[in-house]
Image: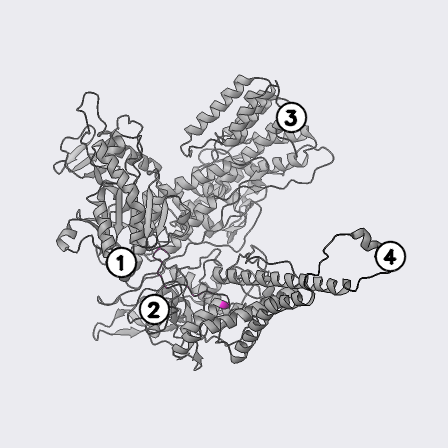
Amino acid sequence: MPQLTPTRRHADHRDHQCRLGPPPGRTPARRRSRTGATAGVARPSAGQALRGLAALLGLLVFLTAVPVFLAAWRGNPLPTTWEPARWATLATRGYLHPDVVPDTLAVLAWLTWAYLTLCIIGEALTQTARSRRGPHGTARPGGVSNAPTVPERAGWRLPAPNVVRRATARWVALASLAVSLLSSRAALAATPTTTGPSGHPAATASASADVTTVLGGTAPAPAADVLAGPVQASPGPGPIGHGLPEPRRLFGDIYRCGPYDTLRSVAAQFLGNLDRWKEVRDASVGLRQPDGTTLPPDFVVIGDGTLLRIPLAPAPTTASATPNATTGTAKPARGTPPTETTHTVRPGETLWDIAHNAYPDVPKHDLPHLVGQIFHANQGATDPAGRRLHDPNLLNPGMILRLPVLAGSNGAPTSSAAPPSAGSAAPPGDGPSTSDPNAPSPPGIVRATSLAPGPTRPSPSAPAATRHDDHTTAPNHTTAPNLLPVWVGAAGLLTAAVASTVTSRRRRRDQSLDRRGASPPPHPRTIALHTAVLATADPDGLSRLDAALRALAAQHIPTVHGPAGPTEGPEPLVVLVRPDGTIDVYLRQPRPDPPVPWHAQVDGRIWILPPTAPLPPLPDLPPPCPLLVQLGTEPDGAELYADLEALGILTLDPGDTGTEGLRALARALLATLALSPLAATPRIEAVGFDPLGFLDDDRIDIADDLPTLLDRIIPDLQALHDELAATGHTSTFAARAAVPVENWEPTAALVVLPHPTDHDPHAHADLIDLAGGGGQGLAVVTHHPASPDPDENAATWRLIFDGPAEPGGEPLWRLDPLGLRVLPAQMAADELRDLLLLLDDADQPPHPVPLPPAEPDPAPYTGPDWQVMIGLLGPLAVVARDGRRPSRDLARERTLEVLAWLATHRGRTRTDLEAALWPTGAQTRSINNQLGRARSILVALVGEQARQWLPTRRTTITLHPAVVTDLDLLHAHIRHAEAHRRHPEVAIAALTEGLDLVRGTPARHPWIDAELGSQLTTTVVRAALLLADLHLTHGDTAAVLDATRRGLAVLPAHPGLFAQRMRAYAHAGDRSAVRAEYHSYLRAEQADPLWDGATDPDLETLYRTLTHSTHRRPPVDLRIRRS
């Protein structure tokens, strides 16, 4: 939801309407902006234009004429000498120079002019930054529905009174309006006037762009963004405020598209039905764009800044999904009325409850879109206390909501229409769809994506599970079981790469934590995706694939008794990893005599590695296939991999899927290449799209055009070819094995140009020639044919859209010339955004933990009055206060997991539990059985009264406060120790007792790792650091070593813990032990599979200081001081 800047609170209501626009089907009201910073909804009137010109003229006079007048009046009013004593003497004698008063006034005038000038400059910068960034802010979590929001920092402003700030804001806004009107005069004169749906003349496209630029928006260039594809933000049953589409209506019936809009998403947003996209397209044909061009007939691709005309008049009846068999025409759709026209919100109700009860005929999978429609139709509704509806998660009792009539033959907000004819172009699909929404999917969450042509059907949305503290409740929070994103299920390499990258970044962050910091909680939107990735990733399978490729590369290493010079060996092109673990490798040249344990087929063109066959010990080689990507999964579950460098050229033919199919493939390939654990440092050059957040990756560079891309890659590629010629190897695959010390860094060129006019055939031909037949350090992925000759193209590598294998089946693609059919690894635009958010969230630094007030008097630790403890700091366990444990028959793994989830998600619902532990759905009986076993465990440990600690027949599952986790108790021990920091004996006892709760490596179930992984690890480390610091202050070396040992058992290579151990040995005067401890750290660091190769510089500096000190004991300031 757009946020308002503090200087515009007086216009919050009309700014809210101007930015979001009216609900679908209603004509927007025509209002004039009260401030120039507020987005308008009509063409500026003559009065506004005159006021803008007057403001611009006044601004020029103020900035130029005022300083000229002051300079002409008094010149330099400052004194030319500095004699304060003489001035004071003259003043005491009553003498006052006649120039003192006018000079003082001149100085004050200069200061006032300079101050106001700075205010004007700051306001201009602020409004410019706001218009470029857009109207989005950051919502303040929690609170009631009328709680204010926290705006994002819009720019620099000089501190000023509100009156001055409002005056300068209005002045700058009016002046900028005049500048915009003057600059767009020619465009306004050349643009025809259209008529809006209400009969009023609508604004023109050019005027739209110009006015938007001044009043809070921008008129972006018409260049298409291939990766920034459509985003279907469908609200989920959980936190849906961030998932609802926010209309960016300009004025009249004109709409300026955002970077992720498509015709389908615009139709769903304003017309309530994504299948009415043709109405939007037909109404927008001929509409002039900001660059002066007009939209051609039958266009289907739109980009950031495209202007569309929204047909707000009542739409004609929509074709049904089943045509009339006799006449061939479609039956008209029927509107679906709600059970009531308005609804008064009752206590405890949510939008999901209201939608489910008011529209009983709407299918479950269409509820997310229905909730969004109800929310947008009632935005701004008030309750009896005057609080407005601005967040779909926050409803106040007494609000009167209007329930719209839905269009659709099946009662859903969006209905399926008949597929378009073969000759018609379908717009890029913007929403997730599946062939069968009820079909089982692998464990995971988020949404399924299928990029088939024609109308799509929204599938269940993917709300991220909200992270709550242990004692935070969310009684109205519900989450339905969700589907898996296609890339998580179809791209095992990418899934493993994401899991490894997130774990590595979290580990690096956790190792930087000190005793005064804590790991930040994960972003709520990332938990669901992270859980799905962890549940699906197969690191063991990926490791075996890497070992198989290294075994093939080892065949190129010259032997002592072999011939001198390069050795011929197998060169893999395509790899199939079958569900049973069998690996099929398609080779460039046939090799009929493979070594053991490989088997040859098809005259040696395919080598097969059995799933249980052991591989011989392998030498330490660099990654042999750094540009290995997964193209998809075969219908039988086999994973299809391709070495892009070995292929040389891979042509993408999206067929009927159009630009969106191309975008989805490009996103998945880019993400795989940027994150792949099988690549060292490949270079990725792209042209024709924006990789969004991946621009921060050192591997990726973006070229403006093909000639620029060629200029970048040719020098390095020529050097690589020279090295190949010097070594005598025919491919980089063989060279990496035979000469591993050389840098055989490959380059991947992703050429995805959405417009034919952007295609440079000569540069494209040069790029194809550089790639050659493959294996030469360059991989080219393009959607343009490699050759104008169809016969030559038939022999090249092509990934072609092939359609579904059977009616109603998943759409498949075909890898030619092998003819392998796969469900491709694709990624929708919103899925790429979620992935980037997950990666960025793992990079968030630790946040400081404030100290509690110091207790003046010592008091022993008492802690909460608990009866049952759920163990998370080790394998999942449950224990009573007296130490009794349940029997093995009761304490099953899934039952313990249910108890752990209930103890860490208090006040949540049964639906939440099902979504977290049974993401693909479960029978009611299975869930009831697990909850029954959980009650039986509580009864066995505490008694019959504990049966009520887990109530039945309630929507909200509330666990009794007497059931706690060991993480809760450890936090309580740390707080008690910090509060008694002036009493070391009490603090040491509390921390020692807290660390006794740690039983080993914390539990690592997917949802635990995604939500609590860092917290479980860093809390133990923080307690160990605090305890070691206290013992070090008292000179107890043995106690320091024992405390740090406990922390290292959880995080083996934490520099802070090793630093404490080195300080303890140095304090005892044992320098040899300091050296041994430092080398132990180096070994632990190098043994970490996620180590990035860099040693902690602070620990290295400390090691040098302690080993080269001339004193027997280190200075006191080398130890960590207590706060």
Q: Which residue is mark 1?
A: 759
Q: Which residue is mark 2?
A: 277
Between disc 3 and disc 1, the foreground one is 1
Q: Residue at x 46, y 71 (%)?
A: 183
Q: Which of the two residues, 358 or 270, is positioned nearer the viewer here?
A: 270
Asked if the residues shown at circle 3 and circle 1 are in contact, with their CB atoms under 8 angstroms apart, the answer is no
- SS state under label 2: helix
The type of residue carrying mark 1 is His
Q: Is residue 812 visible?
A: no
Place of residue 1065 in the rendered image (x, y in percent of width and height, measured from the top left) = 57, 20
Our reading of the magenta stretch's main secondary structure is loop
Q: Residues within 10 Å of mark 2 (few under 14, many from 20)?
A: many
Q: What colour scheme has been applied to the protein in the rendered image?
A: one colour
Q: Which residue is mark 3?
A: 1116
Q: Is residue 531 visible?
A: yes
Rendered image: mark on residue 92: 4
Place of residue 245 in the rendered image (x, y in percent of width and height, measured from the top left) = 44, 62
- SS state under label 1: loop
Mark 3 or mark 1, which has the lower sequence index?
Answer: 1
Magenta region: 214-227
The type of residue carrying mark 3 is Val
- The part of the image, by quadrant, that contains residue 243 is bottom left
Q: Residue at x 81, y 55 (%)?
A: 87
Spatial CA distance of label 4 from label 1 is 84 Å
Q: Is residue 425 above or below residue 863?
A: below
Q: Residue at x 86, y 57 (%)?
A: 92
Q: Residues within 10 Å of mark 1 (few under 14, many from 20)?
A: some
Spatial CA distance of label 3 from label 1 is 68 Å
